[in-house]
Image (cartoon, rainbow, N blue to C red):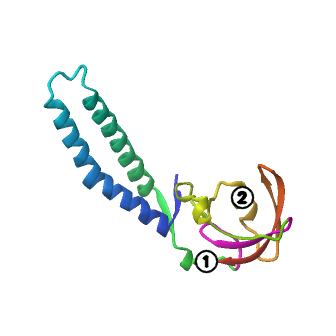
Amino acid sequence: MNTPLTKFGAEKLKEELHQLKTKERRNVIDAIAEARSHGDLSENAEYDAAKERQAFVEGRIAELEQKLSTAQIIDPATLDAEGRVVFASTVDLEDLDNGQKVTYQIVGIDEADLKENKVSVTSPIARALIGKYAGDVVEVQAPSGPREYEILEVRYV
């Protein structure tokens, strides 16, 4: 199964993987060695904590390697979707209830970050927008109830 990622999202995952392999792994190995030097491992909290951290780091490394190996990396700048909302596009919207304008980029699950206005392709708003064009009005089932948005502009940046 391909994991869709924007070019930027793939770079962030690669950076995290590099950090885990080059720094975190070494730190965990050092912590385990330090804890072992304290003697009896059966009641050694530092050893247990270091082993737990090692399991987390190795698990995350495996997860990132798997995601990157199956990633379908999409560079929004190379898209030509003829004005349609697609994965990786940036969409300017107007909330028809209150006139507020908002911009979202549709990204992969691992990249979603509302603080950066990046919404997961699986989110209700992204599902409502996919395939639509500027000028279309979409209804989104939000936690507070249905909301209507007009698509002002679709960009591939």
Residue nearer the viewer, 81 or 47: 47
Q: Mark 2 and mark 1 in contact (Cβ < 8 Å)?
A: no
**On screen, 1 above or below 44?**
below
Q: Position of residue 85 (x, y in %)?
A: 69, 70
**On screen, 154 above or below 96?**
below
**Judging from the image, what secondary structure is the residue with disc 2 in?**
helix
* Residue position for label 2: 127
Query: Dot 2, crowdedness within 10 Å: few (<14), some or many (≥20)?
Result: some
Drawn side of residue 102 relative to residue 68, left or right: right
**Judging from the image, what secondary structure is the residue with disc 1 in?**
loop
Residue nearer the viewer, 68 or 8: 8
Residue 89 forms part of the magenta stretch: yes
Quarter of the image containing the C terminus? bottom right
Q: Amino acid at mark 1?
A: Tyr
* Residue position for label 1: 156
Q: Position of residue 17 (x, y in %)?
A: 35, 55
User: Start and end of the magenta stretch?
Assistant: 83-97
Residue 151, by quadrant, is: bottom right
Drawn side of residue 102 relative to residue 114, left or right: right
Query: Dot 1, crowdedness within 10 Å: few (<14), some or many (≥20)?
Result: many
Q: Amino acid at mark 2?
A: Arg
Q: Position of residue 50 (x, y in %)?
A: 28, 36
Question: Residue at position x 39%, y 46% from top?
Answer: 60
Which mark, residue 88?
Answer: none
Give the mark nearest the N terminus, 1 or 2.
Answer: 2
Q: Position of residue 47 (x, y in %)?
A: 25, 30
Drawn side of residue 10 relative to residue 93, left or right: left
Question: Residue at position x 42%, y 47% from top?
Answer: 63
Task: Report the residue that reaches farthest toward the right.
Answer: 97
Question: Residue at position x 33%, y 34% from top?
Answer: 52
